[in-house]
Image (spheres, rainbow, N blue to C red):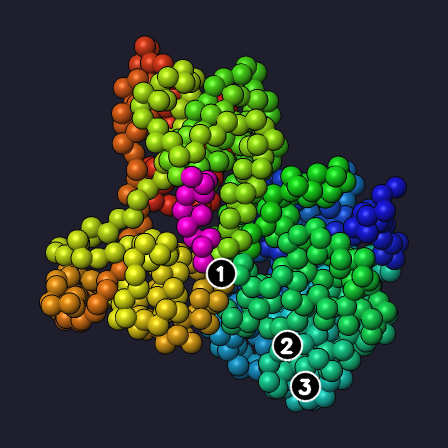
Amino acid sequence: MSNDPLLQPYQLKHLTLRNRIIVTAHEPAYPEDGMPKARYRAYTVERAKGGVALTMTAGSAAISRDSPPVFNNLLAYKDEIVPWIREMTDAVHEQGAAIMIQLTHLGRRTRWDKGDWLPVVAPSHLREASHRAFPKKIEDWDIERIIKDFADAAERMKAGGMDGVELEAYGHLLDQFASPLTNELDGPYGGSLDNRMRFCFDVLRAIRTRVGDDFILGVRYTADECLPGGTGKAEGLEISKRLKESGLIDYLNVIRGHIDTDAGLTDVIPIQGMANSPHLDFAGEIRAATDFPTFHAAKIPDVATARHAIASGKIDMVGMTRAHMTDPHLVRKIVEKREDDIRPCVGANYCLDRIYQGGAAYCIHNAATGRELTMPHSIAKADCRRKVVIVGTGPAGLEAARVAGERGHEVVVFEAASDPGGQVRLTAQSPRRREMISIIDWRMGQCEKLGVTFHFNTWAEAETIRAERPDVVIIATGGLPHTEVLSKGNELVVSAWDVISGDVKPGTNVLIFDDAGDHAGLQAAEFLASAGARVEIMTPDRSFAPEVMAMNLVPYMRSLQKLDVTFTVTYRLEAVERSGNQLVAHVGSDYGGIARQQTFDQVVVNHGTIPLDDLYFELKPFSSNRGEIDHDRLIAGEPQSVVRNPDGQFQLFRIGDAVAARNTHAAIYDALRLLKDV
């Protein structure tokens, strides 16, 4: 047996967990009609196949109709969920893993105009900033109904074969009762800590009565809200002890912080550029004070930190949830002593930010996550070996090289620059986004193991490619900044890339016209403002940086607000002209009726990229498919078979930003779904 602390079994009451790594509850937003159907099941089972000890589903499943899901949660209040749960639990158990589900009533952390349009309820009329709903103050009959709903939902989950349920307290209704900031009730459920905790214990007793003792029951809760007037550390420790002493639960899942604002949520679940495992020591204090099984997860992305968490005795089970979205086979690779092959979570938080913006969770650099029904996590060998030539070593080109290498093909890659990475290498120059370079480093490491041949500092001409006598050519040359968007003065502006790379000297009074809304605009602003410039970010959109999304925006705002950056929305830069050593910006609005002028000494335009596609069009006449992709076959996961030129020498495809300006995930997805069938 291995002596690795992470691989030791753990006995949780009657349940034996095969190691110390768990996937904590999260909602990837894959349900169909509120049910965990084939897609949801495939996603969950993949992590069980990968060796995790316990996978928790839902973040969280709704137990009442007046707790409508705001990001496609499972609907645990419906009887029809039971057979779907049973299919999933049986499949997970077959892989040797345990499975639990998280249940909740969202309280005020939802919206009244979702689901059945019922008023949201909470122990006060105080609105949660994130979801903006003004709640109805909960009544006695609401409390009775919701307690029963919790018990009913838990009973359904047991009938579906779950090993247990976890109650989501922090930020949700249970915590809204417990916190003095959100509980304004009188009488038995408000006032003293005893009264504020009464609802939680009433729920736990009702569930335990319904499911019996041979069913795991836990609570994920905050032991310190980190808010003035809220549940502080001392009271959180008392809550922890009371939960243990109740005899109603089997473990604590400890959180520190609050989630009622984007900033609070981001501190609870940190993203790239923020410290790893910021709450681990705090969880360890709870474990030491209670001497009770303690789980914890919060940006523990790497095996070394997880191993320390267990070896030091700080916690009993370590959550590596986003890490498993990046690599569901993480545990298996630890067992096989292949830790270098683990695809690293880079903390980009594309997964969670998409959920909170109403989309499904996708990993920024594992395009198979959430697409297990159509995309492989392990690449199968091809029936016959082919020669694949790739131009470009950005994320698209390197993913193409990796997948083609896994297929067993001979792979040759040309890159004009001296180093791989493309736009990712550029964006990783900012300290906030330095972790992004792991997307490139991991692929380079995999390609080297697979024997991929690289030619750096090589500008590939059409003749260069044809001389390789390839069977398949992939153009992944990316794009160049698109700054010619003005009616006049395009030659007077610089790009966000120019600023980030250091190719241009920062001005002192700078306008950034951000018509792309991505990271580049904010990175340029931070660079310029940190250099002492006065910076205004202007966008024609009604909100700035929409592609950055909520949680990724938080660290930028903390920095840019301190640097006194001005944000201007709904205005469009139309033209620029020189006046002496200054630049006059002509500003209008898509809404009409506005024309004004402002003076700056530097104007930066961030408007995405234009494809660098000359090589593609030069090679197109020599290809058998003339660059055409059969979209139906691509989507169905079938090999490309288009022949438009029978005399063609090779198949030709272009991917990533060489097609159109998109993002890192789109580039990697292009490569995976095309090359997996080459």
In the displayed structure, would residue 479 be above or below residue 594? above
> At 36% from the left edge and 61% from the top edge, which residue is drawn?
524
Number of the label disc, if any, that sits on residue 190: 3
Q: Does 625 appear in magenta? A: no
Determine the secondary structure under disc 3: loop
Which of labels 3 and 1 is toward the front? 1
Which of labels 3 and 2 is toward the front? 2
Left/right placement of residue 567 relative to residue 220 reads left
Q: Quarter of the image containing the N terminus?
A: top right
The answer to whether residue 519 is seen in the rendering is: yes
The answer to whether marks 3 and 2 mark residues whose Cβ atoms lie closer than 8 Å is no
The answer to whether marks 1 and 2 mark residues whose Cβ atoms lie closer than 8 Å is no
The answer to whether residue 101 is seen in the rendering is: no
Question: Residue type at mark 2?
Answer: Glu
Give how far apart the Cα atoms at labels 3 and 1 are.
Answer: 43 Å
Question: Residue type at mark 3?
Answer: Gly
What is the x, y in percent for residue 145? 67, 71
> At 60% from the left edge and 73% from the top edge, which residue is drawn?
258
Mark 2 lies on residue = 225
Magenta-tinted stretch = 418-430
Give how far apart the Cα atoms at labels 3 and 2 are.
Answer: 18 Å
Closer to us: 186 or 226: 226
What is the x, y in percent for residue 47? 68, 43
Q: Quadrant of residue 529?
A: bottom left
Label 1 vs 2, first from the N-terminus: 2
Determine the secondary structure under disc 2: loop
Number of the label disc, if any, that sits on residue 432: 1
